[in-house]
Amino acid sequence: MKRAFFPVLLLATALLSACTSTIHVDAGKSELKRSGGAVASVYVTNRERAPEYQILRSSGIYRISSTPEGVNRLTLHEIKYLPVCGNPFLVTLFTLGLIPVELPAPCIFRYELETNGKVEEVEHHLPLYERYSIWEWPLKWNQTGVYARALATSKLERRPKKSPHSPPR
């Protein structure tokens, strides 16, 4: 009986601290809401990038065209997730996930936009944070929608694409 106590206790601890996370838009860090003005039409050249394409489509920052003629061309890149400090996880560890912990979830949504033969690289810094606790599992919702709302209100940077043949400066 004593031999089984430690493995059972270890299993119970692992199950009780089975924290999960949810992504949220950080309203304090998001830019002004998008304007209701004209939205440019784009043709996405790599629609097979499923999560990025769904996020772009759901965000409404561009009108997605089904034909490449007469519209800007957009090439999606993989979302880049940036590392963060994990020290707040100690609270979750010691409380078995009972106290929620919030961490920034910095990520960059990247794509190339070709307009009239000119290509520029565009990066959106998504204002997101991730909350961890044992209480998060019933709160799982449409994570693509959260990323799309963050993309629609994100800070963006545009810069001309560097030619692979240009000399370094």
Image: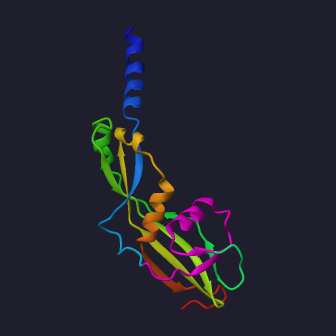
In this view, the residue in front, 60 or 15, is: 60
Against 151, residue 169 (above or below) is below
Magenta span of residues:
36-64
Left or right: 87 with respect to 46? left
* Quarter occupied by the N terminus: top left
Left or right: 57 with respect to 130? right
Residue 9 is situated, as x and y percent measured from the top left of the image, at 37, 21
Left or right: 34 with respect to 76? left
Which residue lies at the image location 60% right of the left edge and 65% below the top edge? 53
Residue 79 is situated, as x and y percent measured from the top left of the image, at 53, 64
Against 70, residue 56 (above or below) is above
Q: How many marks?
A: 0
Which residue lies at the image location 41% right of the left edge and 71% below the top edge? 153
Name the image quarter holding residue 165.
Answer: bottom right
Does the stretch in magenta take in 43?
A: yes
Residue 111 is situated, as x and y percent measured from the top left of the image, at 57, 74
Name the image quarter holding residue 46.
Answer: bottom right
Q: How is the image coloured?
A: rainbow
Which residue lies at the image location 61% right of the left edge and 91% below the top edge? 167
Does the stretch in magenta take in 63?
A: yes
* Quarter occupied by the C terminus: bottom right
Residue 163 is situated, as x and y percent measured from the top left of the image, at 63, 87
In this view, the residue in front, 100 or 71, is: 71
Name the image quarter holding residue 119.
Answer: bottom right
